[in-house]
Image (tube, helix red, strand yellow):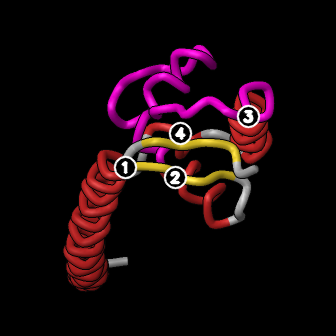
Amino acid sequence: MNVTEFLRLLQADHNNTAARADHLREQIDQLTSALAEVEARLAEIVTTGKVIGSLIPLDHGQDPAKTATVYQQIVTAFNEHPRQVFRVRELHELLGLPTDKPSVNITRSRLGRLIRQRLLTQPGRGLYQKRT
């Protein structure tokens, strides 16, 4: 092999390697762009989760069995005190449930459901009693 042939092969190898490098740079640019889009989407999902998490009542993570147990506790309390009229906070204290505002609001919703199911009545605003 002479020097001219060697230089021609070296130039061909250089051209091929430069073309490969250009192709890889294009791929890197495409992947960088795709990565930026995916990271932006991940940030949106995290933000959405935080916003929704702040709006959902505290017991959103409870399993249905525990929720059913709370309903059972409420119904049992009214069955044990059929003539007594309860406010939500009084019911919470009786059942040993937290008395923070979100928990009380959840129970208020549950009591509304029990009223619609005709298990309870509402003799006055904020008052609940077993239906007789």
Which numbered disc, 2 or 4, marks the residue closer to the eye? 2
The kind of residue on which mark 4 rests is Asp
Q: Which residue is mark 3?
A: 82
Q: CA distance from mark 4 to mark 1?
A: 25 Å
The residue pinned by badge 1 equals: 125
* Disc nearest the viewer among 4 and 1: 1
Query: What range of the chain is rendered magenta?
Result: 79-108
Mark 3 / mark 1, whichever is N-terminal: 3
What residue would you read off at disc 4? 59
Would residue 96 appear left or right of 48 to someone viewing this image? right
Say if the magenta span includes residue 69.
no
For numbered disc 4, what is the local secondary structure?
helix
Residue at 33 percent of width and 32 percent of height:
101
Distance of mark 2 from mark 4, alpha carbons? 24 Å
Asked if disc 1 and disc 2 are in contact, CB closer than 8 Å, the reply is yes
The image position of residue 18, as x and y in percent, is 21, 77
Name the kind of residue labelled 3 in the image: Pro
The percent coordinates of residue 14 (x first, y second) are: 23, 76
Rounded to the nearest angstrom, the CA distance separating label 3 from label 4 is 27 Å
In the rendered structure, which disc, 2 or 4, sits on the residue that comes first in sequence? Answer: 4
Above-or-below relation of 35 to 60: below
Q: Earlier in the sequence, mark 4 or mark 1?
A: 4
